[in-house]
């Protein structure tokens, strides 16, 4: 179990280097770190300079934190996250979320690159997450509960804020963007899913699949944070198209939709009311 002091020391090593307190945390997934380049008056902190912080090892995850201004709000953006498949245990995967909580951040935007399970989806579309399926048994809350972060048994009925989903859909409509809505399924990775697994997930009601996000959302929900989740459908999942899956395609599609992604996030942040 990670000592509470490690979270506090990490938070202190961040707060000592920044001015205004961030009000929104952002986790930027594979190929989506470009959003951090939109932040102004920012300071960049490599993860290696934050006490007790893990290191990101995946292509498309820069491994640095950017704190600054975006659409009139002070944000803390993670350019790169941590995955169970990298060898980290779940408590380490959600370490940054709990550090955000200690910093006083109560609002979280999580983004990811995902495979399309819903056959009506197309690569390059964006999806707002309305719920998730955790197809992996270990929870980041496993073990002794620390009341500093939340109660022993936390409610997950509305892990993804309905209010923020409405804001995202309204923003997309006004921008003329297609925004799908659906359920995100979490698989452990790093192997892509088999066609049989994708058929199973579709039967269970999943619309997209990926190897991240859900542990972070569980930790955020545990801490009472308001969460919005966005997926970039970078490829169709195994067995839907007659072609193999490749991480290079994920990065290429993320780059191709960067303009739509940036426009949507900026518009959402304009409408994101803090303190409600």
Image (cartoon, helix red, strand yellow):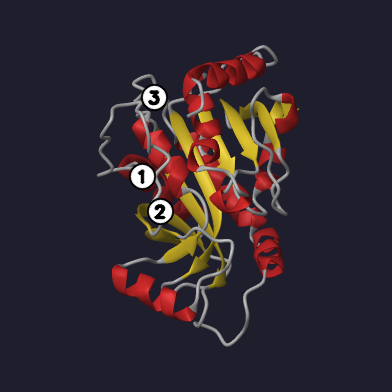
- x%, y% of residue 221? 36, 36
Q: Pointer 1: what residue?
A: 160
Cβ atoms at labels 2 and 3 below 8 Å apart? no
**Image height check: is 137 above or below 76?**
below
Q: Quadrant of residue 21?
A: top right
User: Going by the image, does 205 lie left or right of 239?
Assistant: left
Looking at the image, residue 223 sits to the left or right of residue 111; the answer is left
Badge 2: residue crowd in 10 Å (few <14, some 14–19, many ≥20): many
Outermost residue toward the bottom in this view:
242
Is 263 in front, or is 101? 101
Query: Could you tell which of marks 1 and 2 lies nearer the N-terminus?
Result: 2
Quarter of the rendering containing residue 45 = top right
Q: Which residue is mark 3?
A: 149
Q: CA distance from mark 1 to mark 3?
A: 18 Å
The residue tagged 2 is 129
**Which mark sits nearer the N-terminus, 2 or 3?**
2
**In this view of the protein, which residue sits in the foreground, 243 or 20?**
243
Verify CB contact (< 8 Å) between mark 1 and mark 2.
yes
Q: How dense is the environment of label 3, judged by Cα within 10 Å: few (below 14), some, or many (20 and up)? A: some
Residue 270 is left or right of residue 47, and the answer is left
Helix, strand or loop under label 3: loop
Q: Position of residue 255 (x, y in %)?
A: 70, 59
- Nearer mark to the viewer, of 1 and 3: 3
Q: Horizontal placement of 245 versus 166: left or right? A: right
Q: At which x and y percent is residue 250?
A: 65, 65
- Please tell me which residue is depicted at 71% across the width and 35% down the height of the picture: 64
Q: Is residue 208 visible?
A: yes
Residue sitting at 52 percent across and 19 percent down?
103
Question: x and y percent of residue 3 in the render?
Answer: 51, 21
Q: CA distance from mark 1 to mark 2?
A: 7 Å
Distance CA(mark 2)–CA(mark 3): 24 Å
């Amino acid at each position: 179990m990670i000592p509470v002091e490690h979270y506090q020391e990490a938070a202190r090593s961040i707060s000592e280097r920044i001015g205004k307190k961030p009000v929104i945390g952002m986790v930027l997934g594979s190929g989506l770190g470009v959003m951090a380049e939109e932040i102004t008056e920012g300071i960049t902190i490599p993860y290696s300079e934050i006490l007790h912080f893990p290191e990101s090892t995946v292509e498309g995850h820069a491994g640095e934190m950017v704190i600054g201004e975006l659409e009139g709000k002070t944000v803390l953006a993670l350019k790169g996250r941590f995955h169970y498949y990298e060898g980290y245990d779940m408590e380490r995967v959600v370490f940054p979320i709990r550090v955000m909580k200690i910093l006083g951040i109560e609002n979280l935007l999580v983004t990811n690159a995902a495979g399309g399970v819903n056959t009506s989806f197309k690569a390059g579309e964006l999806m707002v997450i309305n719920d998730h399926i955790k197809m992996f048994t270990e929870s980041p809350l496993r073990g002794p509960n620390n009341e500093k972060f939340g109660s022993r048994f936390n409610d997950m009925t509305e892990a993804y804020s309905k209010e923020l989903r409405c804001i995202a859909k309204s923003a997309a409509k006004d921008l003329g963007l297609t925004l799908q809505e659906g359920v995100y399924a979490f698989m452990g990775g790093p192997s892509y899913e088999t066609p049989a697994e994708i058929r199973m997930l579709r039967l269970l009601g999943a619309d997209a699949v990926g190897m991240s996000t859900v542990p972070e959302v569980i930790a955020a929900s545990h801490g009472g944070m308001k969460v919005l989740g966005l997926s970039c459908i970078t490829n169709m999942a195994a067995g839907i198209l007659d072609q193999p899956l490749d991480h290079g395609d994920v990065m290429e599609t993320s780059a191709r939709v960067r303009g739509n992604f940036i426009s949507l996030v900026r518009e959402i942040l304009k409408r994101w009311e803090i303190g409600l």
